[in-house]
Image: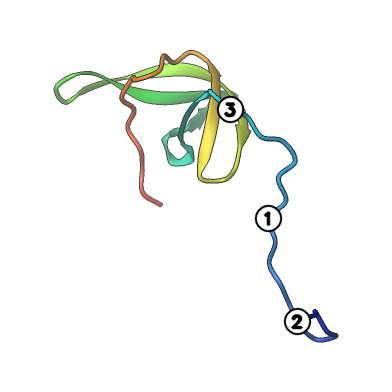
Amino acid sequence: SRIRAGMTSNAIILGRTAENVIAVPSSAIIQKNGGDFVLIQNSGSKYSQQKVEVGISDGGYTEITSGLSAGTLVATFGK
């Protein structure tokens, strides 16, 4: 099959990919006062705000380049 006049299509073009990185759901990123933060779980139901540096994002997940260790639990928010 070929694309013909009047037909439409959706495409995702990846400009850059990364492997072996820390990534969180994009809904976990809080943008505040010009910085990026996540809420990390301290113990039980206690959370604290943690400043992070972000890298690339595919819309669903965002790379964290500093400020977060692998395995740290973060809160996410529904949209």
Q: Are marks 2 and 3 in contact (CB under 8 Å)?
A: no
Residue 44 picture location, percent across and down: 14, 22
Rendered position, 3 above or below 40: below
Q: Are marks 2 and 1 in contact (CB under 8 Å)?
A: no
Task: Inspect the image, locate mark 3, and give the three-letter code of the amino acid beneath it.
Answer: Glu
Q: Secondary structure at mark 2?
A: loop
- Residue 73, image quadrant: top left
Q: Residue furthest right?
A: 5
Asked whether residue 33 is in view, the answer is: no
- Determine which of the numbered discs, if any, sits on residue 72 in the image: none
Task: Inspect the image, locate mark 1, and give the three-letter code of the amino acid beneath it.
Answer: Ile
The mark nearer the N terminus, 2 or 3, is: 2
Q: Residue at x 47, y 16 (%)?
A: 51
Q: Secondary structure at mark 3?
A: loop
Q: Residue at x 59, y 43 (%)?
A: 58
Q: Which residue is mark 2?
A: 1
The mark nearer the N terminus, 2 or 1, is: 2
Q: For marks 2 and 1, give the CA distance.
A: 20 Å
Disc number lying in front (2 or 3)? 2
Q: Which residue is mark 3?
A: 19
Disc number lying in front (2 or 1)? 2
Q: Residues within 10 Å of mark 2 (few under 14, many from 20)?
A: few
Asked whether residue 48 is in view, the answer is: yes
Rendered position, 13 above or below 73: below
Q: Which residue is mark 1?
A: 12
Q: Looking at this view, is 43 or 4 the one in front?
A: 4
Disc number lying in front (1 or 3)? 3
Is 26 positioned to the left or the right of 57 in the image? left
Q: Residue at x 68, y 55 (%)?
A: 12
Q: For marks 2 and 3, give the CA distance.
A: 34 Å
Residue 1 picture location, percent across and down: 75, 81
Rendered position, 30 above or below 7: above
